[in-house]
Amino acid sequence: MNIIDKRNSLASHRSRSYRRRSRSAIRNIAIHHSATTSGSAEAFARYHVNELGWPGIGYHYVVSRDGSISRCHDLEVVSYHVGNSNAHAVGICMVGDFRTQSLPDAQRQATLDLTRYLMRQLNIPIDSVWGHIEFPGYSWKPCPSISMQNFRNWLREEGATLSGRPSPAPTYVAGVRQRTILSRGDQGDDIQALQERLDELGFHPGPIDGIFGPQTEDAVMRFQRSASILVDGIVGPQTREALRDFESPTERPDHGSPTDEPDENEEMYRSETRRMLRHIQPMMRGEDVQEVQQKVGATVDGIFGPETEERVRQFQRSANIVVDGIVGPQTWRALDRVAQSNGVSYQRLLSVQTPFLRGEDVKQVQQELGVTADGIYGPRTAQAVRDFQRSENITVDGIVGPQTWGRLFE
Ligand SMILES: [Zn+2]
């Protein structure tokens, strides 16, 4: 086992630091993937510190695809990777996106060796080695996107050769029936086709064996959650259609950015446990979409379409954060932050729209600017906003986003 000690060389926050614990507080080993196709302890540390503002990298260990291991923290450090369970867990992150990539032998072997070593050192049983998704509150998170059942079996079978996916057991009943509804207990070619499709989309259903068991059901539910359709673990017409049309989310630019995980810090925790919202097909729906739409000034219909995406971009531009039209942890935090600023609360992006935006917040802006306070955001108000922005030396666009709002009411 090749461990490189990087405890003193990785990026860390200038003023914040992680709390510490005694080793006896550690109850779980948490297995993650980075959800990026490449990366390193250095890149993740920079991302966690510079982009997310964490005290340091979120993981205790990072295992690269060639099997080399970076040690990032003392075990006593309570870093951020499994939310409310951080205090009791040690985090191991395997570099890779196992929704689309396979787990290389060298990396798997190194991760198993490291896990066994930590189990011995901390006296942790196999059943307490959990995937991120198995921690309370994370059943929605496709991390580490490998079967943890297999992983624990591998831990048991020290030394056994385990390359590749288990070959399909020829136990299913081959058939040509075209069933319209598939559910737990069903077997056959159509189940195998379903499993292959789920696997291809990154919702690994366990062994591709033509048997609709609990792992397949779980994969169907994870898929349904991602597709924002009814989550019941049953494949009917709606799920079938969504399976056909679903596009796996494309790789994010290059952040080297696992978005694991926050801490007990309420604001951070909330933003991390909320869905990532973006414009995909089928379009995402829900109350969280409505909340975003209201805050960025888009039509509030609860469907994340192109208009919402554009408003999110405007919001990000005015909040001075990465402009990608995606509501991830950083944007959620920005949305939360502005909502609480300065007594007069910011609720939404104000701009000239058809029909004109109306409301109490518009009136407050007008009063502050000394124009007629009729509560209607028209061209005259936008002009006064531009003048104000010019005088404040901030972006002149006639739009009241968080930054302009902050300057007006600070
Ligand atoms: Zn994770």
Image (spheres, rainbow, N blue to C red):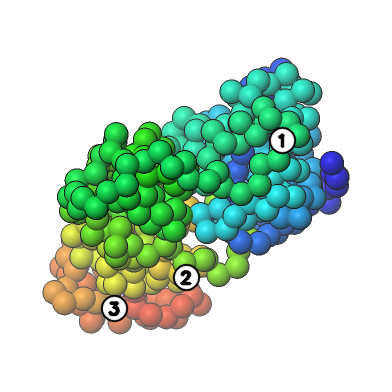
Residue 164 location in percent, x, y? 61, 49
Q: Is residue 251 left or right of residue 314?
A: right
Quarter of the image containing the C terminus?
A: bottom left
Which of discs 1 and 3 lies nearer the camera? The answer is: 1
Residue found 61% across the figure and 31% down from its top: 153
* Amino acid type, residue under disc 3 in the picture: Ala
- Of residues 39 and 265, which is closer to you in this image? 39
* Amino acid type, residue under disc 2 in the picture: Val
Disc 1: CA contacts within 10 A as few (<14), some (14-19) or many (>=20): few
Quarter of the image containing the N terminus?
A: top right
- Report the residue marked by disc 2: 323
Per the model, the C-alpha gap separating discs 3 and 2 is 23 Å
Which of discs 2 and 1 lies nearer the camera? The answer is: 1
* N-terminal label among 3 and 2: 2
Residue 223 location in percent, x, y? 35, 50
Tell me the element at label 3.
helix
Residue 310 location in percent, x, y? 34, 73
Would you say residue 73 is visible in this rendering?
Answer: yes
- Report the residue marked by disc 3: 382
- Report the residue marked by disc 1: 160
Would you say residue 206 is visible in this rendering?
Answer: no
- Asked which quadrant contains residue 59, the reply is top right
* N-terminal label among 2 and 1: 1
Per the model, the C-alpha gap separating discs 2 and 1 is 48 Å
- Of residues 133 and 395, which is closer to you in this image? 133
Depicted 323 relative to depicted 154: above or below: below
Q: Is residue 163 left or right of residue 275?
A: right
Residue found 32% across the figure and 50% down from its top: 189
Q: Is residue 126 left or right of residue 235?
A: right
Q: Is residue 41 left or right of residue 200?
A: right
Residue found 71% across the figure and 35% down from its top: 160
- Asked which quadrant contains residue 297, the reply is bottom left
